[in-house]
Image (cartoon, rainbow, N blue to C red):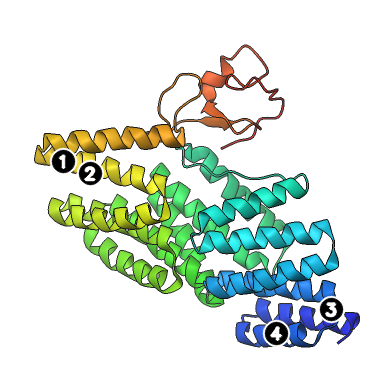
Amino acid sequence: MGQDQTKQQIEKGLHLYQSNQTEKALQVWMRVLEKSADPAGRFRVLGCLITAHAEMGRYKDMLKFAVVQIDTARELEDPDYLTEGYLNLARSNEKLCEFQKTISYCKTCLNMQGTTVSLQLNGQDYEKALFFPCKAAELVNDYGTGWSLKYRAMSQYHMAVAYRKLGRLADAMDCCEESMKIALQHGDRPLQALCLLCFADIHLSRKDVQTAFPRYDSAMSIMTEIGNRLGQIQVLLGVAKCWMIQKELDKALESIEKAQELAEGLGNKLGLLKLHCLCERIYRTKGQQRELRDHVVKFHECVEEMELYCGMCGESIGEKNNQLQALPCSHFFHLKCLQTNGTRGCPNCRRLSVKPGYV
């Protein structure tokens, strides 16, 4: 199969994929992979296969194709292809929660050529958290159909999360329902699981525990199926909060214990921070002072390790909704603190900060 035929078949697969004929698209792309003699075409079709398997939650297959793609990139001896190949290896390992490998491949990308890296922090600046998915949704509307439906679904999901944290639960429900509708149309299992988790969190915010429980169960079922262990931690913490509302503190601790086992296995410090915070509330209610002190200490250790505090005033970040701002050097601060800074440089490392980024 030559270059022109390879290109035609890849486009045919894309058309099928955009029409929700996923299995037929995969068959077309696999034939291209087997028969094409064009290395650049093979690289491109491997990218399609990686994306499709990521969206279906088949992360092990995603990694398999990413490994083949990096071999193809080496054959092409082009730094742009190599960078994209290593980035796909990083994405694949991230989905499988192999974070050390993810970091290693990302560093390889950065060492190869100048790359802009987006750092998502779990600080609580909900207005900014809402701004970015809203902007993404606007871009989707501007640029049309096809792949844009998938991007629209993700932007709607992230808008739902931000609306929920802002207490705008009706808006959160509307966005999550639209995202779920598209996810069901495309058979996007990972996004379906996230939407179910979001639905459960919305009902939890309404103190409607009986409606939240079955949605957490459904989310857990899919996340277990696709291997999303980070999502499983979020589900277990949500379930623990439900038990706390019902004053079933021992059952809440059982859920937290399961979440802790997963978080420690993954090295997920943010998950550990959240569960120590919940344990602090539970043991304070139970009046168990020794356990309470233990979790308070561990909570502050997590804050220190993750540097979740303002680089100027020293107050912890994430306990309440604050306006935050990050500089290009990756140090971040309360916006009000940064505005009082008399210099144009970072207060921590003194690097020039002409173009601040936003968290």
What whole-number distance in Å separates the C-alpha atoms at marks 1 and 2?
6 Å
Residue 345 appears in the picture as rendered: yes
Say whether disc 4 or disc 1 marks the residue closer to the N-terminus. 4
Residue 212 quadrant = bottom left
Disc 1 target residue: 283
Mark 2 to mark 3 CA distance (whole Å): 56 Å
Choose mark 2 or mark 3, whichever is in front.
Answer: 2
Residue pointed to by mark 2: 279
Looking at marks 4 and 3 on the same chain, the residue that comes earlier in the sequence is marked by: 3
Residue placed most toward the observer, 271 or 73: 73
Earlier residue among tags 2 and 3: 3
Q: Quadrant of residue 198?
A: bottom left
Q: Secondary structure at mark 2?
A: helix
Q: Which amino acid lies under the numbered mark 4 shown in the image of this protein?
A: Met
Disc ID at residue 7: 3
Q: Spatial distance from mark 3 to mark 1, Cα to Cα?
A: 62 Å
> Nearer the viewer's eye, disc 4 or disc 3?
4
Name the spot of residue 241 as percent of width and height, x first. Answer: 25, 51
Q: Horizontal and vertical percent for residue 58?
A: 53, 74
- Residue 147 located left or right of residue 210: right
Q: Amino acid at mark 3?
A: Lys
Identified at 61% across, 52% down, the residue is 104
Asked which quadrant contains residue 2, the reply is bottom right
- Which residue in the protein does label 4 denote? 30
| The one of 64 and 346 positioned closer to us in this rendering | 64
Q: Position of residue 31 (x, y in %)?
A: 73, 88
256 shown above or below 297:
below
